[in-house]
Amino acid sequence: MWIVTLLALCTVLCCAQGHKQEECLNLHITPPMIKDMMETSELIQKHLPRDNAPFHRILVKLKKCSKKLNIPDFKRILEIYDEHVFQKLWKNSTHQQPKLFMDSVARLKDMMEICETKGKQTPSHCARENLKTIEDKLKTLQPNGLCKAQSEFRSVLVWISYAMDKRRTHEIH
């Protein structure tokens, strides 16, 4: 009997932590911010070289567990993208859109860091298995591959919007 009670209590505590992180995301990140990032990303994409391999996805392994991703996963994805894609792609850019986009990514990373403290602070099992592979792949990308990775970043924004609040996701995309 004690074991069942203990398991039920653990389940309630885990759910409450996830809910606190969701509330934190909703408090700090607005749907218009995510939508604006998606639109800016699409505008930037129009000025980049065309994708020669549209069916070859970089984030395919993470897509399988996109609904299970937590705040530490998103924080790590943002760090990986910032370091291995955005910094390389736009390090010498003088255009306004990439700068605005990078500012938004930095704000998003800051918000993830704040919300990470509200619950589980370890990566999900699914992401833990796949993030290292994706990071290794992004490290070795050539310029055209960086453009492809930038175009796939929209998926990350959709996953974040889903994590924010499953009821509000339809407002963003």
Image: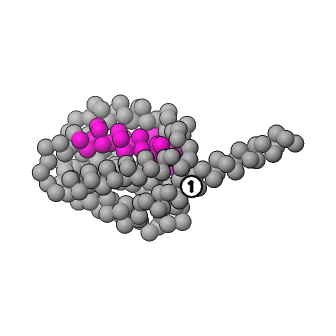
Residue at the image position 60 percent from the left and 50 percent from the top: 17
Q: Is residue 52 visible?
A: no
- The amino acid on which the numbered mark 1 sits, given as a three-letter code, is Lys
Q: Quadrant of residue 46?
A: bottom left
Residue at the image position 23 percent from the left and 41 percent from the top: 87
Residue 66 location (% of width, % of height): 49, 48
Is residue 140 depicted above or below 100 in this figure? Answer: above
Q: Quadrant of residue 84?
A: top left
Most foreground residue, 70 or 158: 70
Residue 43 location (% of width, % of height): 23, 60
Residue at the image position 50 percent from the left and 33 percent from the top: 129
Q: Farthest bottom residue?
A: 171
In the image, residue 69 lies in the stretch drawn in magenta: yes
Q: Which residues are magenta?
A: 58-87
Most foreground residue, 172 or 164: 164
Say which element carries label 1.
helix
Majority secondary structure in the magenta region: helix
- Residue corresponding to mark 1: 20
